[in-house]
Image (cartoon, helix red, strand yellow):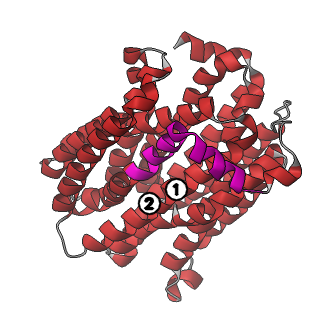
Amino acid sequence: MSSYLRLLRENPDFRRLYLARLVSFGGDWFLLVPMLALVHDLSDSPLLTAAVLTANTLPAFLVSPLGGVLADRLDRKKIIVWSSFVAAAASSTLLTVNSAFVQERGIAVPMVLGVMSILAGLSALISPASSASLGQVVSEENLGDGSFLLESTWGTMAAVGAALGGLVAANWGRERAIAFDAISFLVAAILTIRIKSKLNSSQVTTHEATRIGPALSYLRKRPAVSALMTSKAGFAIFGAGAVALLPTLALDEFGAADDGVGWLLGMRGVGVLIGPFIIRRLVGNRDRAILGTIGFCMTVWGISYFGIAFAPTLLIAAICVLIGHAGAGSQWSFSSYGLQMYTAPELKGRIFGLDFAAVTLTSTASQLLFGWLAIRTPITIIIFWLAVAAVGFGIIWRQVTLKYWAAM
């Protein structure tokens, strides 16, 4: 842990990049929990509740390839800054969601879904630019630690933001959470402006950066990198659908309020945060060991979700969520680490953009499908079979990909 703290303390540009991503994700989670509960209250529909998460992913699939190209072609700092400013303006419009004008016309749910879609599209511009910038602000020997820290921001704020978002919404109103989200984007923009390093690789020309073809060709020639890209996208087929059901599980099965939703999603975030650091400490710093545990981490998620399917209380379900997402967060972090280490610098924007597009596509399909099934099938039964599928996928993925890591 001392190496992570040293990197944050001694590298101001990395610290600013890290904090910008941290506060931006924090605002997102502050917003997501109350919006899930609001749509559930207004519609009483598992499908529309899951659609909030879909609105948070589908536009990202559509925009991500463009985001990857722009991250390799344009000034990454400007992409992050201007996208953050637009996101602040978009999220501020949700302050009117409880107004008489919106409520009388019955447009609150479409408004929430629309704004969440805009924010997701902007996130698909910010994330590839941020991830691809890492190699420009840290040295090669610090790239591993920097990657783990940068990828941990999502889990950190999923834990803190989701829990606090639920508590704030339940006790002081959803408007406070919306305001925090808007402010967080402004803070992220200011932090990014203060980064002094040039965030783009000098190894790529403007003409080359407009083409997806070289990235696809690169993936065909490097099966290990291609395998890493199937990790998140494949796992999301099961994981995203199950996570989309957690708010309805908390609200309907356990009779909780906004804070109950925040509790489950917050424990998800804690697991995502601590899992990669714990498992990396156990297996060591060798790439072969780190990447070889990805399939195992998927099975940890599946086994833990068996527990959620049979959990008698919200507390036990939350503990299972924590353990499960320690595994899920590790497979996410480790696959991102592999892409960071084994992708050519001039292609990182496009590779991360394609990776983000793939995972958002499978996440969207999973959320919509299992949200629809939840209308006519008990949620716990759906979660049980998703857990079975995830365990099987993790075992198969590990066996198929072991040969790639053995050569490292």
Tally of numbered tags: 2
Percent x, y of residue 215: 67, 49
Residue closest to the eye, 131 or 224: 224
Q: Nearer the viewer, residue 237 or 375?
A: 237
Q: Point out residue 238 in the picture as x, y percentages from the top left corner.
A: 32, 54
SS for tag 2? helix
Q: Position of residue 77 (x, y in %)?
A: 81, 43
The residue shown at (58%, 12%) is 3
Q: Is residue 16 above or below residue 4?
A: below
Identify which amino acid the numbered label 1 is placed on: Ala
Residue placed most toward the observer, 33 or 140: 140
| Residue 314 as seen in the image, left or right of residue 335 | left
Which residue in the protein does label 1 denote?
Answer: 358
Dominant secondary structure, magenta: helix
* Residue annotated with mark 2: 362
Q: Residue at x 37, y 40 (%)?
A: 328
- Which residues are the magenta region? 211-234
- Residue 105 shown in magenta: no
